[in-house]
Amino acid sequence: MLTDERKEDIKTKLGALISPSKDEQSVDVMIDLVTTKVFNKLKAKKQSVEEYPKELDYLIVDLVVARYNRVGAEGMTAEAMGNKSNSYVENFENKEIESAIDDYINSLDDEIRSSNQYGDFLFLWDMIERYRL
C-alpha cells in the first residue's frame, strides 16, 4: 500500500517522537495496520480513491505514536502509579481517522469546485447528481 520510500519517511518522522529502532518490527506492523485501516475507511467513503494519499501520511504518524505509547495499556481507560496518572481517550483512533478522512474528502471536493469552469451551475448539478435518490 505504501512504497518503501514513504514508509521510511514515516519512520523518520516517528523517530523524532518515539524510538522505532528499539522495536522496528512492531513499528512496521503498526504502520501497516494503521495504513490499511485508514485506507479501508477512506475507500468506503470515496470509492474513486485508488491508492493511499500522501496527504494523510501525517495521520499514520499520529496514530502509530498513539498505539506505540499505549502498548501494554490496551483496553484501559485510565491508570495511576504513585503521583502519575494517565487517562486515555475512548475511540481516539476512530475519531481521528473519521475527522481526517472527512477533511481530505472535503478538500478534494473543494478542488473540483474551484477547477470547475462553469462555476456554480455545475456545482449545483454535481450536488443534484450526488444526492439523487
Image (cartoon, rainbow, N blue to C red):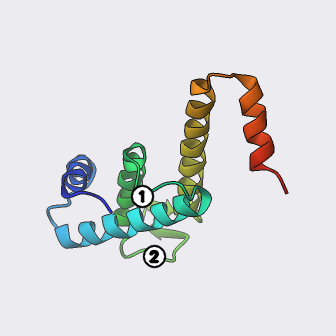
- Amino acid type of the residue that numbered disc 1 sits on in the rendered structure: Leu
Check the image and report above or below for 62 versus 33: above
Of 79 and 35, which appears nearest the observer? Answer: 35
Question: Which residue in the protein does label 1 denote?
Answer: 63
Of 94 and 54, which appears nearest the observer? Answer: 54
Q: Is residue 48 visible?
A: yes
Check the image and report above or below for 81 versus 4: below
Q: Left or right: where does residue 34 sit relative to residue 109?
A: left
Can you say which quadrant of the picture contains the N terminus? Answer: bottom left
- Amino acid type of the residue that numbered disc 2 sits on in the rendered structure: Glu
Please tell me which of labels 1 and 2 falls first in the chain. 1
Can you say which quadrant of the picture contains the C terminus? Answer: bottom right
- Report, in whole angstroms, how far the alpha carbon at label 1 lies from the one at label 2: 14 Å
Q: Residue at x 40, y 55 (%)?
A: 52
Element type at marker 2?
loop
Tag 1 near tag 2, CB within 8 Å: no
Of 84 and 57, which appears nearest the observer? Answer: 57
Question: Which residue in the protein does label 2 denote?
Answer: 74
Q: Quadrant of residue 107?
A: top right
